Image: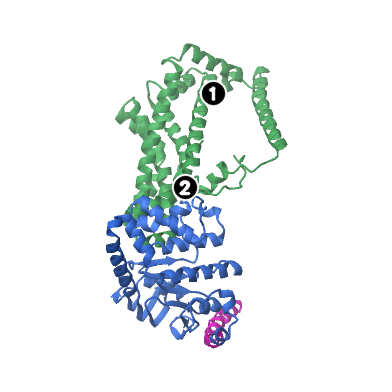
Chain colours: A blue, B green
Amino acid sequence: MASTFAGRRRAAHGAREGADAAVRAAQAEAARIEAAQIELSGVTKRFVTPSGSMFTALRDVDLTIGPGKFCAVVGPTGCGKSTTLTMVAGLDRPSAGAVRVGGRAVSGITPGISFMFQVDALLPWKTVLGNVALGPVFRGVPRKQAQAAAKEWVRRVGLAGFEDHHPHQLSGGMRKRVSLAAALINEPSILLMDEPFGALDVQTKAIMSNELLGLWEQTRPSVIFVTHDLEEAIALADQVVVMTAGPGTVKAVFDIDLPRPRGAVQEIRFEPRFLELHHQIWASLREEVEAAYARTVPETRGGHR
Amino acid sequence: MSEPTGTVAISPQTKADETAGTCHPARRRKTLVWAARIATLVVVIGGWQLLTSAKIVDRFFWGQPSGIAAQLNDWVRHGTAYGSIWLQIWITFKEAVLGFVFGVTAGVIAGVLLGQFRFFAEVLSPYIKIANAIPRIVLGSLFTVALGLGIAAKVSLAAVLVFFVVFFNAFQGVREVDRNLLSNARVLGAPRRAITRHVVLPSALTWIIASLHVAFGLAIIGAIVGEFLGAQKGLGLVIATAQNNFNPDGVFAAMFIIAVLALTAEGLIGLLERRLLSWRPPSHAEAAAV
């Protein structure tokens, strides 16, 4: 990671500053990791529903994600997982409590963050290259430099040769790769992912998970990865957070002590330690899933009555 | 084309259906379609000619295709009462194009601004609704009195007609921008200006372009009506003169010229559309849809 960072700097500033740039890159690296701790303390989020009543999505969420950690959040539908992400990103404010990133309270858009949405947020009128280059372009990097960086990232996610395609010409998996490149090109200190691979078929999902792990191990941002899929969560993460049925709060945090690099996610799920963890976490998660389900069933019955 | 008293936003999808997508229909089918088209033309024009020659329909009121052709020929050879026919066409075309350009520019600017600043949109929305409900064609009378018989009155009328259609579509287009795309741009650190340029405008462009097809038709209507209300040159004046002389062939002949103008402009806008919206996935809608 440091080498590519330094390399780009060197290209920009000229070879004579090479040593200098390497020092600066190292400093940037240090700053990046320092800035990456995420803390939520007593976070509550309420919404006003269209009918005018109050709806509590999150209640008293306390969660700390260490710098450079990969944290997966699992929980039943509607437990406020996505809401947590938008508050860390600064797209939304908590009703009570505080969100801190790198020790600083979040106000406005959190700097150094990238967000991968459930549906891909690619601009349909831009090519693959244009979409990936958006981050640098928005930050005011000169066009040529931005495009060069984008080209490199398109190559890294395995889409070399597709630079001039438009999103609608790509498959779902390829679009996810573009989103991933667009998210990572800014060299974020935090990567937020909201069920990024939810819409993909099982095989593509496994491939994308492997790619994500590979890229993450190179750059090591802190990650919050929201998912429904417990196997995916365990295979990828250092830490799995189980949330309760809505209003969501943290029920339990499990440390995943599977060694890294993990290798293929398709294979790790047969290891005894994986199964053991899966068993433990599922026991905790199942109660919440059942509680959430039980809550929907009487409602529908009530409707029939 | 009729003058709508209340304008609603035209969805870009309907436009996409109309212009995009030639799959590969069998060649035979294509030939058949063309043959049927020519047959339709022959039946309509031939029937009109026959009915008027046979005096079933009175050609004094309803004209006659051969008379229209003769009238066109006469205009091309000897000009109209107000100078050459090319001059009349040029004047009307100039008025329509200028009105179109002003109307589109103002409509896009107003639509994008109001679409982005909620406060202004809320303040102005009742007035815009009222303005939209007024039959704006009547403004032509005002413009003729205030701005005189020159080109300015016609350009203003055309611009007003164009403005509302484009404005509503631009406004709607800005509001329809995908929230995800906006959030994503914000998270990537885009300043407001960059969001407008890279996300909002391109997204609204589909809507704006969809409105341009209708808008040019309205620009021509504005120019012609303006000339009707008082002018020294232009196709509208030629039509008014033909009407006063009980010359239906003249009215039809001028209508024909205007249709050619409108179709040409429509073709140019179609080219522009294909260029600007080349990123869109090809739709498989029927190309022959009217």
Q: Amino acid at mark 2?
A: Thr
Subunit under mark 1: B
CA neighbours of label 2 inside 10 A, class few (<14), some (14 to 19), many (20+): many
Q: Give how far apart the Cα atoms at labels 2 and 1 are.
A: 35 Å
Residue A220 lies, in percent from the top left, at 41, 72
Which residue is nearer to you in this view: A240 or A97?
A240
Residue at image position (49%, 47%) is B10
Residue B19 lies, in percent from the top left, at 55, 41
Residue at image position (34%, 56%) is A11
Main secondary structure of the magenta stretch: helix
Per the image, label 2 sits on a secondary structure element best described as helix
Label drawn at residue B206: 2
State the extent of the magenta-drawn residues as a range.
A278-305
Residue A174 lies, in percent from the top left, at 54, 60
Q: Disc 1 marks which residue?
A: B252
Residue at image position (52%, 48%) is B280
Residue A297 lies, in percent from the top left, at 58, 80
Subunit under mark 2: B
Q: Amino acid at mark 1?
A: Phe
CA neighbours of label 1 inside 10 A, class few (<14), some (14 to 19), many (20+): many
From this viewpoint, is residue B8 visible?
A: no
**Image height of B241 relative to B112, above or below:** above
